[in-house]
Image (tube, helix red, strand yellow):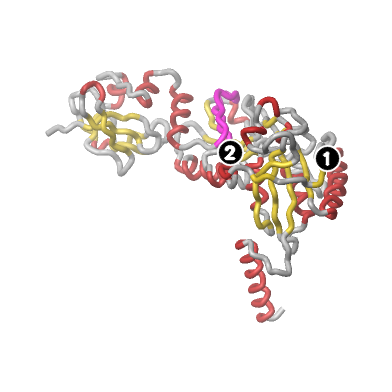
Amino acid sequence: MNSSEGASNSANAAKMRALVDSAELPKTVKSEQIVFGLGCFWGAEKNFAALPGVIDVVSGYADGRGFDATYRNITQAQQRFNPDNYAEVIQVSFNPMLISVQDLIIAFYEMHNPTQANGQGNDIGTQYRSTILYSQPEHAQKAQYLTQLYQQILTQNNYGSITTRIKPLDTFYPAEAYHQDYIAKNPNGYCPDHSTGVRFDGSVERVVAMDNTALLQGQHIVVIDAPDCPYCEKFKADVATSYAGSIPMHFRGAQQLQGLSVSSPTWATPTLLFMQDGIEVHGVQGYVAPKKFYQLLGAFKLGDSEAFNVAFNKGTDSQFCKQYEQFKNVGAGVFTDTLSGEPLFDTDYQFNSGTGWLSFTQAIGDSVTYHEDNSLGMRRIALKAKTSGIHLGHVFDDG
């Protein structure tokens, strides 16, 4: 290939990407649509929207009858096992020149567990059923063929029968506005993963085994993580990257928890597990903001103690307490946040205030924040650790 041909191909590729990004197709190319139901439509919408060649994905309802298709209606208790309930679905519009309906159906099957009837994971009910709703006969033919093929592969991997319903689309009802692009608009959630891990090429998603021996002793934090999970990336950016606490933090996939006693569901990412000697003490599904994380960590590390009360419940250490006597005459060094590990005070700025509390003339950098405190009939300025939010004491004007 000469340089002019390479430049031409690069220009053409750029044009095609621009068409996909802007969802504008040449008049000679018609977009096509197919409707999928694979559990809660929030995660399905995000996953399909990320596929190259997909123009638009809309969450909605289909394949029901007898009442208006609204989220409020389909989630009523009496509809949970109603065979005429509407399914949560996504309408996928795509450019067939860039992605085939076959590729979309393959992605559909590999994204969820089609052998689970009327549900995905803990989401149970007919609204979560697996379904393919088509508007073109050739889409139906592809769906039937790929379903038979995938059934053979699933059977070889000890899975049961596929429950997916393949039907012509009657009417698609777009869901309420707050359901559209839900994951993008709600960064404090979780990403569900109900996939079997079985691929159409016959392979099974390879899970790298992890040695969890070290987690069987002492306290540990385990974060169940997954690729392409925006909530996982947000937790890493907001919390994990700066965390330097004494309790080790480990990242694991849902299939990498061998040897650990875990009671929380593991299908949502991120999920935080606070472990003691290999046994889960507490678990939290979904993204956890820094403030909440350090409160959970404080409860885990400090327990029901006076230290936790001081850190988070506006308690006050007694004067001349054990810690004061231990640290009042230490040598050169720094005092760090007991939870985050962040340096707070340098002993170069420590002095004896005569109050019975450890005292410093200044903190390290911007490691602390200042807050009005009008409790106990006094007007004071309280200090908190910037990262963990634990209470550190008060500012006093010594004149």
Distance from the alpha carbon under mark 1 to that under mark 2: 27 Å
Would residue 217 appear left or right of 90 to someone viewing this image?
Answer: left
**In the rendered image, is residue 178 in sight?**
yes
Rendering coords of residue 291 (x, y %): 43, 34
Per the rendered image, the range of residues in magenta is 271-286
Q: Earlier in the sequence, mark 1 or mark 2?
A: 1
Position above or below: 21 against 329: below
What residue did someone put label 2 on? 190
Of labels 1 and 2, the one closer to you: 2
Q: Dot 1, crowdedness within 10 Å: few (<14), some or many (≥20)?
A: many
Whether residue 333 is visible to the viewer of this picture, yes or no, is no
Q: In which quarter of the image is residue 138?
A: bottom right
Towards the viewer: 122 or 62: 62
Q: Where is residue 346 in the image (x, y as percent from the top left)?
A: 29, 38
Q: Residue at x 67, y 33 (%)?
A: 74
Q: Residues within 10 Å of mark 2 (few under 14, many from 20)?
A: many
Q: Which amino acid does label 1 sit on?
A: Leu
Q: In this rendering, is residue 111 above or below 94?
A: above
